[in-house]
Amino acid sequence: MAKKIYIQLFLLLILVTISLFLFFKYFKQSNLKNDLKINVEQTTNTSDSLIEDLKYLSTDKDGNEYKIEAKKGNIDQANPDVIYLENVNAVISLQGTDYISIESNFAKYNTKNFDTLFNDSVSVDYGEHILKSEFLDLSFENNLVSLYDNVRYQSAFSSLSADKAEIDILNKKTKIFMKNSNSKVQISSTSKNGNN
């Protein structure tokens, strides 16, 4: 009788071992790789959700890349998908074109949809073109960059001042306008030697 119980326990142990092996090999939920990669060397202070020296990288199905780096970031306690960043540098690399570089003192970054609101001394560098403003709203969902409040454009040949500029990322079409229809966009041309 005892021999029969030992055989049953042994078979039960084998069955449990095989079940656990199959579960962990085939059914355990694996960590899904997100397009968003966090720099491993970041340090986190859990008491106030402070992240230092952070870096996010996103690549879409067409090979376009969006990289954003900041000296500091604070996770929004009410919405953990939102991070408030300080001393921000971002680069958008679109297939077949030059990269677009964005710098600002602060930004609000959404880790879920990658939309970013840059503010305070925003500077955009695209080839020979430089745009400056107080705010820049980058929406990947709408493929739109909106610059507003004290927009200034500078190139080797011209400069302008306006209230708002909108850039379609995919079509590379730009609209520049004033909020008040009675106001006009201020444009000045610059010759090669720097004279107006």
Image (cartoon, grey):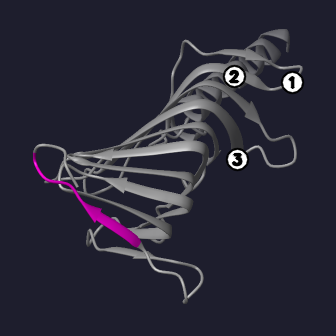
Task: Give the distance between the C-alpha atoms of the residues marked 1 and 2, in whole angstroms.
Answer: 9 Å
Residue density around tag 3, few if under 14, some if 14–19, many if 20 or more, within 10 Å: some
Q: Give SS at disc 3.
A: loop
**Which residue ends up furthest to the bottom in the rendered image?**
181
Residue at horizontal 58 percent and vertical 41 percent from the top: 27
Q: In the image, is residue 16 part of the stretch drawn in magenta?
A: no
Residue at horizontal 53 percent and vertical 82 percent from the top: 183
Q: What's drawn in magenta, residue-wise?
A: 186-192
Residue 73, image quadrant: top right
Q: Is residue 49 above or below residue 30?
A: above
Residue density around tag 1, few if under 14, some if 14–19, many if 20 or more, within 10 Å: few
Q: Position of residue 10 (x, y in %)?
A: 70, 15
- How many numbered marks have been drawn onto this rendered protein structure? 3
Location of mark 2 (residue): 51
Which of disc 3 and disc 2 is earlier in sequence?
Answer: 2
Which of disc 1 and disc 3 is earlier in sequence?
Answer: 1
Task: Give the distance between the C-alpha atoms of the residues marked 3 and 1, in whole angstroms.
Answer: 15 Å
Question: Which of the labelled discs sits on residue 81, or is there none?
Answer: 3
Task: Give the distance between the C-alpha atoms of the residues marked 2 and 3, in whole angstroms.
Answer: 14 Å
User: Does residue 71 appear to the left or right of 75 in the view shown?
Assistant: left
Q: Position of residue 80 (x, y in %)?
A: 76, 43
Q: Are discs 3 and 1 less than 8 Å apart at CB?
A: no
Inspect the image, locate mark 1, and give the three-letter code of the amino acid beneath it.
Asp
Residue 190, image quadrant: bottom left
Question: Which of the labelled discs sits on residue 48, or is there none?
Answer: 1
Q: In the image, is residue 189 part of the stretch drawn in magenta?
A: yes
Q: Are discs 2 and 3 less than 8 Å apart at CB?
A: no
